[in-house]
Image (cartoon, rainbow, N blue to C red):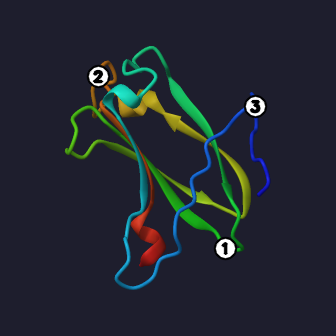
Amino acid sequence: MPDHTAHGESAVRVTFPEYTPGGPRWPSLRLRGRNLARRDWSGFSGAVFQATNIGDESVHLALEVRDTPGRNGWVQSYLLHPGATVLRADLALAAKSIDLTHVEEVIIFMDCLLYT
């Protein structure tokens, strides 16, 4: 498997399964509470991460930031074309709908648009 590290020495690799009827509609990676390196994001205007689509077709990916576990938070969707893409989340926009001083959950998931 190729190393997709963009900067630094390491990266996390998450592989979402290809959708099959009856399978998970929104496969996700969830980071909760104490698993977050920092829970106060109020001092940041944005978040940047790189995602690599190793497939041949574009896919929809979404980032959700929640200030209350189990309750919908702020969501930003992205269209990932094949290859590496740098994704930017506008946290100033997120601050209009959630409390960035108390981030409780971060979810990266395959957006439902993929399956419609």
Residue name at image x 45 percent, y 30 percent: 91
Residue of label 1: 57
Inspect the image, locate mark 3, and give the three-letter code of the amino acid beneath it: His
The x and y percentages for residue 87 are 61, 43
Return the residue nearer the eye: 57 or 10.
Answer: 10
Residue of label 2: 102
The x and y percentages for residue 17 are 52, 69
Q: Which residue is at the far front?
A: 1
SS at mark 3? loop
Decide: few, some or many residues near mark 2? Use Cα within 10 Å; few <14, some 14-19, many ≥20: some
Which tag, 2 or 3, sits closer to the chain's start? Answer: 3
Return the residue nearer the eye: 83 or 90.
Answer: 83
Residue 40 falls in image quadrant = top left
Which tag, 3 or 1, sits closer to the chain's start? Answer: 3
Decide: few, some or many residues near mark 1? Use Cα within 10 Å; few <14, some 14-19, many ≥20: few
Depth-wise, is mark 2 or mark 3 nearer the camera?
Answer: 3
Residue name at image x 38 percent, y 77 percent: 23
Residue of label 3: 7
- Contact between labelled residues 3 and 2, with CB atoms less than 8 Å apart: no
SS at mark 2? loop
Q: Is residue 12 above or below residue 55?
A: above
Residue at mark 1 to residue at mark 2: CA–CA distance: 36 Å
Which tag, 1 or 2, sits closer to the chain's start? Answer: 1
Decide: few, some or many residues near mark 3? Use Cα within 10 Å; few <14, some 14-19, many ≥20: few
Inspect the image, locate mark 1, and give the three-letter code of the amino acid beneath it: Glu
Side of 14 where 53 appears, left or right: right
Side of 113 where 33 appears, left or right: left
SS at mark 1? loop
